[in-house]
Image (spheres, grey):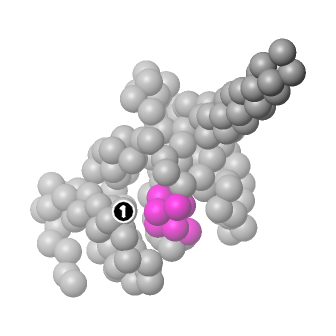
């Protein structure tokens, strides 16, 4: 009987730890305009957590939320321009499950941006990762669609 109680306690502790870790990883409200506001208000003082919290809010469900869609897209490009290293670091280290959605956002800007300048800034990021290459490819695709040839 004592052995059974010990096993039960171990299973309970294991289950609790597993569930709390799962919930911690999925603690992201999609289409959260407050996260966009945080990026906007702190654009000169951004942290890893702020950028991660912002990036995780992107989702296909947000397409119907015009305010979020437009402002988040604009802020994503401002981040790429102002903090390319931080955004690549977050993409590289955060295991976000919406990378394809983020790349689609980059490929569909709502305004015209200086793609050459942004591409150069992302290229200069010292982190070598698949995410950096995917972001560069997405920016170059947009530029090509706009008839702009990105110079190396």
Count of marks overlaid on the render: 1
Q: Is residue 139 visible?
A: no
Closer to the camera, 87 or 36?
87
Q: Mark 1 highlights which residue?
A: 131
Residue 87 point in image, percent of width and height: 51, 63
Residue in front for this viewpoint, 105 or 27:
27
Q: Residue at x 48, y 70 (%)?
A: 84
Residue projecting furthest to the right: 2
Would you identify the image quadrant in which residue 131 lies?
bottom left
Left or right of 7, for residue 76: left
Which quadrant does the C terminus fall into?
bottom left
In the depicted structure, whether residue 147 falls above or below residue 1: below
The stretch drawn in magenta includes residue 85: no
Give the image location of residue 55, x and y in percent: 53, 48
Q: Is 103 or 64 nearer to us in this picture?
A: 103
Residue 22 in sight in this render: yes
Q: Residue at x 56, y 31 (%)?
A: 30
Prevailing secondary structure of the magenta residues: helix
9 relative to 94, above or below: above
In what quadrant of the picture does the N terminus appear? top right
Q: Position of residue 139 (x, y in %)?
A: 28, 62
Q: Residues within 10 Å of mark 1 (few under 14, many from 20)?
A: some
Is 13 placed left or right of 127 in the picture?
A: right
- Quarter of the figure with residue 20: top right
Q: Is residue 90 magenta?
A: yes
Q: Residue at x 66, y 34 (%)?
A: 18
The residue drawn where x is 19% and y is 58% is 141
Residue extending farthest top: 1
Q: Is residue 27 above or below residue 116?
A: above
Tell me where the magenta segment starts and ends, as one range.
Answer: 86-93
Location of residue 13 in the rendering, given as x and y in whole percent from the top left corner: 78, 31
Which secondary structure lies at badge 1?
helix
């Amino acid at each position: 009987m004592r052995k059974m109680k010990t096993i039960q306690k171990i299973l309970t502790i294991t289950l609790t730890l597993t569930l709390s870790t799962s919930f911690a990883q999925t603690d992201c409200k999609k289409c959260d305009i407050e996260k966009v506001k945080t990026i906007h208000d702190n654009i000169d003082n951004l942290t890893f957590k702020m950028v991660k919290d912002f990036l995780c809010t992107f989702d296909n469900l947000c397409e119907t939320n015009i305010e979020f869609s437009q402002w988040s897209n604009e802020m994503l490009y401002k981040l790429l321009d102002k903090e390319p290293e931080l955004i690549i670091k977050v993409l590289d280290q955060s295991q976000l499950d919406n990378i394809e959605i983020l790349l689609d956002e980059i490929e569909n800007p709502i305004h015209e941006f200086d793609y050459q300048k942004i591409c150069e800034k992302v290229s200069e990021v010292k982190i070598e990762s698949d995410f950096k290459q995917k972001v560069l490819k997405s920016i170059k695709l947009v530029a090509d669609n706009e008839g702009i040839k990105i110079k190396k």
